[in-house]
Amino acid sequence: MIKKMSVLVVLALMVLAGCGFEEGFNEPEEVSDSVEQTVELSIVGTIGVELGDSNYVLGAVQQIDFDLDGNILVLDRSACCVRMYTPQGEFIRQISNEGSGPGELLNPMSMTVVGDGRVFVESPFSGGMHAFATEGEWLGLVTPFFNNPPINTIGADSNSYVAMRIEVLPNSSGDVMVNSFIGRYEEGEDPVTKYWEYEFPFDPNDLTALLRNSLMGHVFTADRQGNVYVAELTSDFYLVQGFRADGELFLEIEKSVDKVEKSADEIYEEEIYVIAYLESLGANGVVLEYDAEPYRNSISEVEVDGEGRIWVRRGTELYPVFDVYNQEGEELFTASVPNAGDDAVFWEFNIDEQGIMAYSINPELFQQIYIMELSE
């Protein structure tokens, strides 16, 4: 299953063109493999139309988030702006626009709301990490990032966010290496905490290894208390690890799952999508060959809601199915979206203290945001 592929290939293109967890934690108890209670997520509203009011015609949705009042924020990469909607989906305002002037954006790559309410937008081609008020005012450049910027930013507590980042640098022997890590940022250029890190040789002719060893290697999220939850994208095991803001490992969730082979169509669609997207971005002079994994990942997404419940999406399912756990790692219930349709395999969720919503990274027709509620 493709995970945040639009973000992944953008950064892979930038890298190609330009340039273990802590020990000492007790063995976790294995979580029970079955839970009787199953609940449904119902779609109660949508944002996005194919034709009509331009405030609702979405181009290339790069990331979605809730602000602290529950309003919905949509980063549109093609329009170079953030659009704000009410929790019911009514348009409120546009934040920023395309350009290279103060507060303007060029090819923005990620967006999130940090704990103090500011909207952070990463736009390396226009200076780095920008901050905006939800009223639309530009608050300045938080941190300059021109090369290898943080990606998949997730707002945490106070002024902090968690992000994936990869750096391409020579080591002491002169070999060019890729350093990939997930870290906590507090406005500075360097992370204050790293939760996962891996270094490997840089091979510009091996796009597959670059993606698997970095941006397609893990999924992660954070809550407003600063806790961070990380899961490796693999078919070999099912493991979620929870960290305090300072990097202390406090939780491990494991579950036994069977490997599920991808169909020939799944593999073909994934490989074609990655290469087509890179080509659409103008990738030239690099080898664009990508080999999809033969098995589906055990986990495809991790989210955390306002009650501290950890939502782990099963990568083995084509349709959205979540195993939901409490902070002690006990499985509470299973949640699914009935009648989601074939496009749901490409849905990317946002679940936090304000609600639940999703969008497709590869829509069949036109881009939409799906607003959801958990059935009682």
Image: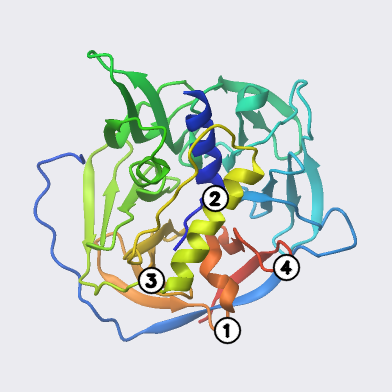
Decide: marks 2, 4 in contact (CB < 8 A)?
no
Q: Amino acid at mark 1?
A: Asn
Residue 339's tag is: 1
Residue 365's tag is: 4
Residue 241 versus residue 8: which sits nearer the camera?
8
Q: Position of residue 142 (x, y in %)?
A: 58, 23
Q: Which comes before the other along the chain, label 2 or label 3?
A: 3
Q: Determine whether the residue tagged by mark 2 lies in a helix, strand or loop.
A: helix
Q: Amino acid at mark 2?
A: Ile
Front label number (3 vs 4): 3
Name the side, left or right, on which 202 lies relative to 97: left
Q: Amino acid at mark 3?
A: Lys
Give the residue number, with chain letter if any, for mark 2: 275
Q: Determine whether the residue tagged by mark 4 lies in a helix, strand or loop.
A: loop
Give the Cα distance between marks 2 and 4. Answer: 20 Å
Give the residue number, with chain letter if any, for mark 3: 262
Q: Which comes before the other along the chain, label 1 or label 2?
A: 2
Please tell me which residue is depicted at 69% across the width and 25% down the height of the picture.
139
